[in-house]
Amino acid sequence: MKILCLCHQGNVRSVAMAYMLKSYYKQDAIAAGIDSNSRGTIEMLFNWMDFCIVMETSIVQKLNSFDAVEKCLVCDVGPDIGVTVGVSHAFALPGLLPGGGR
């Protein structure tokens, strides 16, 4: 099964879900961000997918203009509390680096 995992930026939540689906369930899964990809890219991914897992309820509103909403399931893991686009995770979250980023 081809599964699209969709969150806002496509950096953390959808990537983690795609990884789990690939590693543990041997599914063909890909991660993407609704805000970080063009409409054309999202449409192409919707044409490719068999099923979509949306990582936050608020994303569903952004999908209303696409034809594939009926193929989507919400797995609300909570809001994106990550970093601003363009800022490295190591810089924004220094605890990810050895020595606390010092």
Image (cartoon, grey):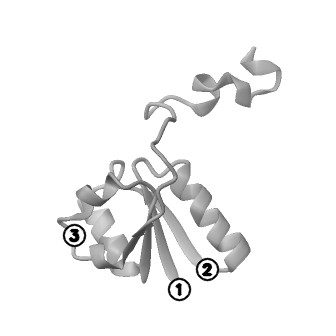
Amino acid of disc 1: Met
Where residue 57 sits, quadrant-wise, is: bottom left
| Side of 62 relative to 11 (left or right) | left
Q: Of all residues shown, which one is farthest toward the left?
A: 65
Residue that badge 1 annotates = 1
- Residues at marks 2 and 1 touching, judged by CB atoms closer than 8 Å: yes
Write the residue at 66% across / 66% down: 20
Image coordinates of residue 17 in percent, x first then y, are 58, 62
Where residue 101 sits, quadrant-wise, is: top right
Residue that badge 2 annotates = 27
Amino acid of disc 3: Phe
Q: Secondary structure at mark 2?
A: loop
| Side of 51 relative to 42 (left or right) | right
Mark 2 is surrounded, within 10 Å at the Cα level, by few (under 14), some (14 to 19) or many (20 or more) other residues, namely some
Amino acid of disc 2: Gln
Of the image marks 2 and 3, the number of the one nearer the N terminus: 2
Of the image marks 2 and 1, the number of the one nearer the N terminus: 1
Residue that badge 3 annotates = 66
